[in-house]
Amino acid sequence: MLAPDGLTLGAGAPKRLVFGAPQAGVLADVNAALGEPKEQGNQEECPAGPLYQASYEPGLQVVFQDGAFVGWFAREGSRFRTAQGIGPGSTVGELKKAYPSTTVEESSLGHEFAAGELYGVVTGPSDTATVEVMFAGTNCIFR
């Protein structure tokens, strides 16, 4: 599950991973739930400073800085959703219903949304447009 302050993994006895948690523990928990990352490594030239990123199938990336979990990024194909059922592939209408304070504005990334501490890019401003990507926390995004 995606949350503004981290992730929840697993069913039954879910594991809550919050921003600020140690990188080694978060990677071990995510690897146990999703398998080994398909890609991982340092991104030295991010606007937020150097970040370590690990990308998993289907469509989830976890982000670390200075040895701590600081963000996540979910793209189309991800089965991860918020507690309100919102994730990549959801419509803007569904997003606004779940998060009434949602704003959609045109930016250098395209049509970007903000729903509290959740952010992302949608295919357009209409209620039928869809969420392409979602993210929270610190990420390597160039505007």
Image (cartoon, grey):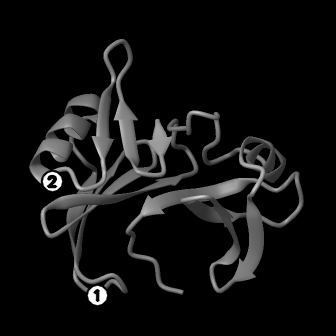
Residue topped by disc 2: 23
Residue at 31 percent of width and 16 percent of height: 13
Query: 137 left or right of 45?
Result: right
Image location (x, y in percent) of residue 5: 41, 51
Q: Is residue 83 above or below residue 38?
A: above
- Which picture quadrant has residue 104? bottom right
Residue at 80 percent of width and 43 percent of height: 97
Number of numbered discs present? 2
Residue topped by disc 1: 45
Q: Is residue 64 above or below residue 56?
A: below
Quadrant housing the C terminus: bottom right
Q: Nearer the viewer, residue 13 or 121?
A: 13
Residue at 37 percent of width and 54 percent of height: 61
Three-letter residue code for mark 1: Glu
Q: Residues within 10 Å of mark 1 (few under 14, many from 20)?
A: few
Three-letter residue code for mark 2: Gln
